[in-house]
Image (cartoon, rainbow, N blue to C red):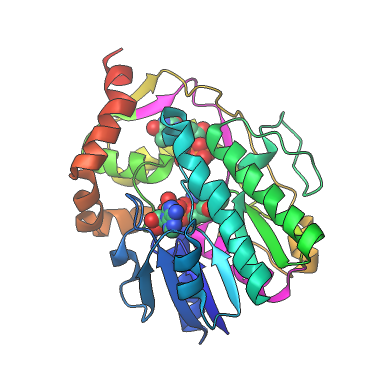
């Protein structure tokens, strides 16, 4: 199969590209190379990398020529950045998805859209979101992802396009940009920098190793039904303060580095996914325990300092970091 992977130079997308290439598929990547896109993530994968925007129909048509399917990872993905610039997420996360749906409509190709558990909003202890649950997004990021999901369903119903989506939980592993909790805390700990824990640190996330997430998306590509959503969760819920302790243990950093800082506005307390549908219909299940996935992730950041130092020393990263944390860490 020839597959266009959009956002394939980012974290999850680059793992997915390597997976398809290893399985013998022919892959083209379309990526705008925003701050989060990094061609180094694709080292060792023989693919054409086309630099372009998923919201640009000509770029999508050119990169998608001859492809049987598009798998869309391209997005503005960070909640904190979406709070700082709520308009910035809409063009890619909504208009971009619409542009890919138009491609599917015109060519008859399949679209697998990669979405998130955050579209369900947060849950009380004990509950788990099912695919049929109402969407109650809390942040500008999750609201834009929910809008993308709804466009997918509308295009299937109205135009009969072959499109479906997956909703993954908090994904971790090598090559994740050091703005998300785990890579930020690991790299800060390795550098003896503060670990800014929002609020009481008792927020709960479900953790999914990147290779398991990619396996689920591949199953959706090959066996998923048009018009359906599939939850892909790790069935492994942990509080942020536990993640923080794991980081200290793995790096040998001092507990004094942990700083409780002002909470994120609108902060979702807990996500949890019911993954029965993906297990039954896609024959998928997460295979990597958190202990194993975390150990592999921590080792990768320890051994690949040059990858993240290049990012963290860039002007763009420093500016973002100061905006996000300077005041909080002074308080
Ligand atoms: P990432 O931020 O690491 O990478 C995003 C990639 O998209 C980058 O390579 C970037 O250059 C590219 N991109 C951004 N805007 C683009 C545009 N307009 N056109 C083309 N390319 C563009 O993201 P990630 O963590 O790998 O997430 C990938 C997808 O998975 C996203 O859709 C995200 O919503 C979803 N997701 C992520 C997680 C997670 O925990 N990271 C969990 C569930 C779902
Ligand atoms: P994040 O990795 O941004 O993922 P998401 O918000 O999409 O779940 O954050 C994961 C959790 O970690 C979330 O509850 C917010 C918290 N967090 C901190 O406490 N400090 C930080 O510096 C960051 C980036 C996140």
Residue 206 lies, with reference to residue 164, above or below; the image says: above
Q: Is residue 203 magenta?
A: yes
Q: Tell me where residue 127 sits by quadrant.
A: top right
Image location of residue 14, percent across then percent down: 42, 66
Quadrant containing the N terminus in the rendered view = bottom right
Residue 252 lies, with reference to residue 6, above or below; the image says: above
Q: Which residue corresponds to the image point at 45% horizontal and 76% vertical from the top-left?
A: 28
Image location of residue 201, percent across then percent down: 49, 26
Q: Nearer the viewer, residue 5 or 312?
A: 5
Residue 319 lies, with reference to residue 278, above or below; the image says: above
Q: Is residue 113 magenta?
A: no
Q: Nearer the viewer, residue 230 or 69?
A: 69
Quadrant containing the C terminus in the rendered view = top left
Image location of residue 154, percent across then percent down: 75, 53
Q: Which residue corresponds to the image point at 31% horizontal and 60% vertical from the top-left?
A: 38
Horizontal arrangement in the rendering, residue 167 relative to residue 211 (left or right): right
Horizontal arrangement in the rendering, residue 18 relative to residue 126 (left or right): left
User: Is residue 117 at least partly visible in the picture?
Assistant: no
Q: Nearer the viewer, residue 7 or 100?
A: 100
User: Is residue 96 at least partly visible in the picture?
Assistant: yes
Q: Tell me where residue 119 sits by quadrant.
A: top right
Q: Residue furthest top?
A: 331
Q: Which residue corresponds to the image point at 36% horizontal and 46% vertical from the top-left?
A: 183
Q: Which residue corresponds to the image point at 34% horizontal and 65% vertical from the top-left?
A: 41
The residues colored magenta run 196-225
Image location of residue 144, percent across then percent down: 58, 41
Residue 223 lies, with reference to residue 326, above or below; the image says: below
């Amino acid at each position: 199969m020839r597959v266009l992977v959009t956002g394939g130079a980012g974290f999850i997308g680059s793992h997915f590209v390597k997976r398809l290439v290893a399985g013998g598929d022919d892959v083209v990547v379309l990526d705008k190379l925003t701050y989060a896109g990094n061609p180094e993530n694709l080292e060792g994968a023989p693919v054409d990398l086309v630099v372009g925007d998923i919201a640009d129909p000509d770029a999508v048509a050119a990169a998608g020529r001859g492809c049987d399917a598009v798998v869309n990872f391209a997005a503005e993905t960070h909640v904190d950045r979406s709070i700082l610039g709520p308009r910035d997420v809409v063009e890619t996360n909504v208009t971009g998805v619409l542009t890919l749906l138009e491609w599917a409509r015109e060519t008859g190709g399949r679209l697998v859209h990669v979405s998130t558990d955050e579209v369900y909003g947060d849950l009380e202890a004990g509950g788990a979101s099912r695919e049929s649950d109402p969407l109650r997004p809390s942040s500008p990021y999750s609201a834009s992802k929910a809008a993308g999901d709804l466009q997918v369903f509308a295009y299937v119903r109205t135009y009969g396009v072959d499109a479906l989506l997956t909703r993954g939980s908090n994904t971790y592993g090598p090559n994740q940009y050091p703005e998300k909790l785990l890579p930020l805390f690991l790299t800060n700990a390795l550098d003896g920098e503060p670990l800014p824990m929002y609020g009481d640190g008792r927020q709960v996330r479900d953790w999914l190793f990147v290779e398991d997430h990619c396996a689920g998306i591949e199953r959706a590509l090959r066996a998923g039904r048009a018009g359906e959503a599939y939850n892909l969760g790790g069935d492994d819920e942990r509080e942020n303060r536990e993640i923080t302790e794991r980081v200290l243990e793995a790096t040998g950093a001092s507990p004094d580095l942990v700083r409780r800082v002002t909470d994120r506005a609108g902060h979702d307390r807990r996500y949890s996914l019911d993954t029965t549908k993906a297990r039954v219909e896609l024959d998928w299940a997460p295979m990597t325990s958190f202990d194993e996935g975390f150990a592999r992730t921590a080792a990768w950041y320890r051994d690949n300092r040059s990858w993240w130092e290049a990012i963290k020393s860039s002007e763009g990263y420093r500016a973002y970091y100061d905006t996000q944390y300077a005041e909080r860490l002074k308080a």
